[in-house]
Image (cartoon, coloured by chain):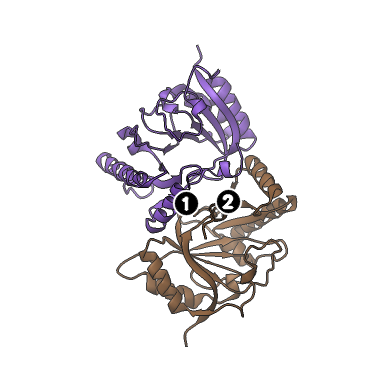
Chain colours: A purple, B brown
Amino acid sequence: MSTCLPIVERFHSLQGEGLHFGKSAFFIRLGGCKVGCPWCDTKESWSIATHQEATVEELSKEAAIAQSQGAAILVITGGEPLHHNLNALCKTIQDFTSHNSRETMPIHLETSGVDEITGLINWITLSPKRHALPKKSLLRACDEIKVVIHQKEDLLFAEEMANQSIKERQISKKTSDENHKISQPHLFLQPGWNSKEGTQLTIEYIKSHPQWRLSLQTHKWLGVL
Amino acid sequence: MSTCLPIVERFHSLQGEGLHFGKSAFFIRLGGCKVGCPWCDTKESWSIATHQEATVEELSKEAAIAQSQGAAILVITGGEPLHHNLNALCKTIQDFTSHNSRETMPIHLETSGVDEITGLINWITLSPKRHALPKKSLLRACDEIKVVIHQKEDLLFAEEMANQSIKERQISKKTSDENHKISQPHLFLQPGWNSKEGTQLTIEYIKSHPQWRLSLQTHKWLGVL
């Protein structure tokens, strides 16, 4: 019996956020989220029942087509994707996208970190929430931390998450391949959408805290899906 | 006698474009430009005479202050910065910003490439223009190519510049430090400001040509200087 997952949408666009900003990307948005952020811009993704299911084979076929049409990365987002077990999806995507000696399509994951990791993921974007804290394993494993900023307290929370992530890596001696130094996550602050205060706070904070960088929801600026 | 340069403006903000997008940056905008792009958004920078001069020591002092306040990189822009000899400016900036064992402030340069390189530059953004072609030395030395897109012909030009840059590197065997492969410039397409056609062309092109990434003038979206 094939694994099915509730799908809100899937589309080929450009990654608008984080370190891989501006890259051609195929997005799979999974349904279901219990994190419940008040400012969430995809509240329709919270419920599971209202979304049609697709098999991991169907999704992987579509990923392979998008790859052949130029998609450089695959982004699993939500909702909260790790509410689901992603082992089968990741395995099938790798099988379907590594044909004709093409490199397997890098799988990126956007998560709040409230669940343990499943699936073979190449890049983890952790977007932690104050009201639903991330697991230590995500603080350890993430490649970038991206914190949404609406008010001052969010900046304190961002520093807390960065410090905890570095502490977790020191405990587990997670070193980067190149220079065997303790690997650091890339750190991004992202103004809440349409939040003037969040934008001003974020820009001023980054100017004086150069370990952080600005991330924006550019796809929304551009009106790009 | 100290070296003086015509200065349009200098300010501490965030880098809005290219690979170093979102970083805290101190900008020095030099006066003078003979390239004359019709869509230029800083035409006031074209003339030299209308801008006050500053000594390289004054500019370097300000750079060191900005660095102490959090600026991660220094960006020399214009106008066309390479109309000027940048040796003295770069040398003085390094002297002033490497105090108290702080790392020297990385110097970034934004140029159309119409003049030969001067000054010790850590990162070169080449923004070539169809009506004023770049020098081969810039095609060879640049770290990223960023082409402004208004119409279809600009996409052809972008590919031409990328190909020429790679060809120049093969001729000169310019390899990257890590893996001794011929180093490739990062490739960015940037829609002309307020150009709907440019934005649509850019997004659709990148979706099917994953070697390119989107760059945006985010500082303008945000109304940040």
Q: Which element carries disc 1, helix, strand or loop?
A: loop
Q: Quadrant of residue A119?
A: top left
Direction left: furthest residue: A171
Mark seen at residue A29 = none
Q: Which element carries disc 2, helix, strand or loop?
A: loop
Q: Are marks 1 and 2 in contact (CB under 8 Å)?
A: no
Report how far apart the C-alphas of labels 1 and 2 lie in the structure: 27 Å
Q: Is residue A92 left or right of residue A168?
A: right
Q: Earlier in the sequence, mark 1 or mark 2?
A: 1
Neighbor class of circle 1 (other Cα within 10 Å; few <14, some 14-19, many 20+) is few
Question: Which residue does the image show at 25% across and 40% down from the upper left?
Answer: A171
Q: Chain of mark 2?
A: B
Residue A211, percent from left and from top: 38, 53
Direction bottom: furthest residue: B1
Question: Which residue does the image show at 36% across and 69% down from the upper left?
Answer: B98
Mark seen at residue B215 = 2
Question: Which residue does the image show at 47% across and 45% down from the upper left?
Answer: A195
User: Taking B46 as reference, is B216 above or below it?
Assistant: above
Neighbor class of circle 2 (other Cα within 10 Å; few <14, some 14-19, many 20+) is many
Task: Determine if residue A131 is in view.
Answer: yes
Task: Determine if residue B172 is in view.
Answer: no
Residue B19, percent from left and from top: 52, 53
Q: Is residue B201 left or right of residue B24?
A: right
Give the amino acid type for the residue marked by disc 1 in the picture: Asn
Q: Which residue is mark 1?
A: B179
